[in-house]
Image (cartoon, grey):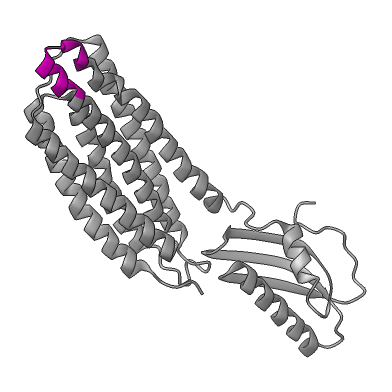
Amino acid sequence: MPADHRRQVHKVLLVTLALNLVVLVLKATLGWLTGSLSLQADALHSVTDSANNILGLVANRFSQPEPDRQHPYGHQKFEALGALGIAAFLAIACFEILQHALERLLTETTPVTIALPELALLLVVLAINIFVAVYERRVGERVQSPILLADARHTLSDIWVTTTVLGGLAGIWLGNQLAWPQLQWLDVVLALPVSALVFYSGWEVLRENVPWLVDEVAIAPERIHTIVIAVPGVLNCHNIASRGVVGRQVFIEMHLIVAARDVESAHDVTEAVEQRLEEKFGPARISIHVEPPDYQSDHISVGE
């Protein structure tokens, strides 16, 4: 049975929610004071950070690992659904960045005014984002939480956004000091690669969580077959299927041909098989259909 880390995940999400709200207020205020559209867009992007934390708290509430009557295979897919919600928020943020960049390219806007104290505040915002990303990633890796790892990736995209905006605003400040109005375009030009980074972050979240939701094979049947037939008493195994995520929770099914003439001996062999697979792949629920020694089958995996 997988360990229940929901309390730790809940604590991390509450801390990061509070910090993300501070970041949101700072960005929105600075965007309004400076007239920077890219900074205002960055503030909109930060709205998704807080929304992600709230979504994560809800998903974490329903992602208990213990099965019940309505969910005999557990509730962990709720957490993967939460991660997909984060991917959707990343897509929205990417669209917002592109939209604001096009507006700056196609329309006349009020020049951006920025001062050193405002740039210093953006450095504080950047430091908070870096802390949140590192904090969530470390805890997420330790407890194997997809919602924390996905949110850490989203915060990493926010770091790149803020860094890009900060670089553009620093260039604009320098242009204002040197009377180079052409540097106003930095606010737009640097926003374009950020949208690509945000899109890539969303793609990574989808790539990691969709296979879990659609029950893609977790372990190659041939790999399971090699491990199982090395167990004493096993003659062969076939119709092997697996799903889940190795390290979190996997489900393995197979038909097992054993060299045993009584139920007790066959049971001992299946226990040894289950122990060997759990040692290799971590938390696992294994279903084995035992067959007599003279049974023959060449189909290692389901669907062959």
Residues drawn in magenta: 171-184
Position of residue 284 measured from the top left corner of the image (x, y, whole percent): 59, 70
The question of residue 179 being in magenta is answered with yes
Q: Quadrant of residue 190?
A: top left
Left or right, 52 with respect to 29, comes to right
Name the residue furthest front.
178
Relative placement, left or right, of 181 versus 33 is right
Q: Is residue 170 magenta?
A: no
Residue occupying the point 25% across, 46% down: 129
Q: Is residue 164 above or below residue 301?
A: above
Q: Nearer the viewer, residue 153 or 284?
A: 153
In percent of width and height, residue 214 lies at 56, 50
Q: Name the residue rendered at 81%, 70% in the picture.
A: 229
* Residue 168 appears in view: yes
Look at the magenta stretch and give its main secondary structure.
Answer: helix
Instruction: Name the residue at 42% across, 46% down.
Output: 84
Residue 1 at x, y = what percent? Answer: 51, 75
Q: Please give left or right for residue 274 compared with residue 66 in the image.
A: right
Image point 12% across, 41% down: which residue?
A: 26
* In-front residue for pair 292/228: 228
Residue 111 seen in this snapshot: no
Quarter of the image where one finds residue 113? top left
How many numbered callouts?
0
Q: Is residue 237 above or below residue 207?
A: below
Of residues 102 and 164, which is closer to you in this image? 164
Q: Residue furthest right?
A: 294
Q: Position of residue 164 (x, y in %)?
A: 28, 30
64 to 262, vertically: above or below? above
